[in-house]
Amino acid sequence: MGVLGFVMSLKMGLRKEDKNRWERRVPLIPEHVKELKEKHGIQTFVQPSKIRVFSEKEYLDAGAQTSGDLSPCSVVFAVKEIPIDFLEPGKTYVFFSHTIKGQKHNMPMLKKMMDLGCNLIDYEKIIDKNGKRLVFFGRFAGLAGMVDTLWVFGQRLKWEHIDSPFSEIKQTLNYKNLGDIREHLAVVGKNIAKKGLPKPITPMVVGFAGYGNVSKGAQEIIDMLPVKNIEPHELESIYKNPSNKVIYKVVFKEEHMVDSIDSNKYFDLQDYYNHPENYRPVFERYVPYLSVLVNCIFWSERYPRLITKKYMKDASKNKKNLRLKVVGDISVDINGAVEFTEKTTSSDNPVFVYKPLTDKIQDGFTGDGVVVMAVDNLPCELPVESSQSFSETLKPFVPAIMKADYDVSDFDKLVLPPEIKNAVILYHGKLTPNYSYINKFL
């Protein structure tokens, strides 16, 4: 067989997304499918879908084939978790598996992949030598999450009978696209600059926990409005003479969230990552000044929380001046950094109110407490732009993933770019050395 014949035998599958009716994203857009075929001879088979944001015709025009059966494909790409009954023996799957923290709900899927001798490559672990993620939807989670958080804020104020410019803002999925959002926020911003914000919410302070891709996306949205950047240590002072013509924006880094337990030691970022047990949480000192908190941090149980239920209960009980109305929990760790994020929400039921005194939650905007927006697949609300961006970052790695020889028995001898090899969770059904710790969750 000639080189061209070998190359043309590369068959890639794009699975339909069916986790929920909002999941319309794709890992590779038609334009890139066409490019991969023309430059690398990769033939794409696309599973038909009624909800996918790009039509079957667009994929057919790009040279793909449609097929409900992806068994001829050596590698299958998806966005979200793959149902157990779809998995085939010995096949390579590339998707967000949500297994690296030992997530309980996905252990049966991982176990099935192990039983079938599958290979699993997880986008979340495609990183460079500095640990920076290379293939991600994070910015779009931030963009959609911030729009939704401002929408929630407006709806909450409406319930409190406070008229504000935010009541005009819609949920992300009710805009045509990002351009539509920009145009509308420009109008809202002019309104704030001209008429000012109502007295009950002045000063309006929006705090961002974290400064990575998610936070950058969220800040992109708030920066479309009249914003004044301040540092955490300035929070108290703005209350002395606040302006109602701006939104005060404050970004919190790790050094603002924790202090060293040893009073003789200064905060050290690398030491905190390695030894979080040597640090105590201090973020709650800032909470009384915030109107809105946008949580964008990666969190695991090793690290202190941002806000605890105890703090919320004490603040409510002691009638402290708790101004926090809305938490946009874009990171969505259940009972995680924001301890009262009791559940994930969906685009059609996006918020609940947490009631600190009873430790209960109630769906919707109404009732005493703090409103929490915890939609767990926010990039779905910007399906075209988020898919285009993701596909652009994934495309350079696809030829190597497709051309790798997965028949090699020894994982050490598997030839893949280091960024991809690092992201191989399972090889021939066994956890690779970097991920052997997941065994304890199985």
Image: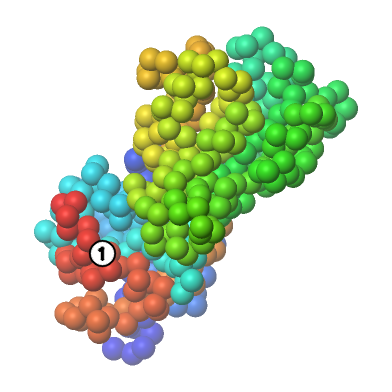
- The answer to which of 73 and 119 lies nearer the viewer is 119
Q: Position of residue 363 (x, y in %)?
A: 43, 18
Residue that sits furthest to the front in the current view: 264
Q: Position of residue 108 (x, y in %)?
A: 17, 47
Q: Would you say 189 lies left or right of 78 here?
A: right
Q: Which residue is mark 1?
A: 435
Residue 326, by quadrant, is: top right
Q: Residues within 10 Å of mark 1 (few under 14, many from 20)?
A: some
Q: Position of residue 173 (x, y in %)?
A: 56, 34
Q: Residue at x 77, y 19 (%)?
A: 198
Residue that sits furthest to the right in the current view: 194
Q: Quadrant of the N terminus?
A: bottom left
Q: Position of residue 381 (x, y in %)?
A: 53, 39
Q: Residue at x 79, y 29 (%)?
A: 240
Does the image show residue 287?
yes
Residue that sits furthest to the bottom in the current view: 2
Q: Would you say 117 lies left or right of 271 here?
A: left
Q: Is residue 297 above or below residue 292?
A: below
Residue that sits furthest to the top in the current view: 161
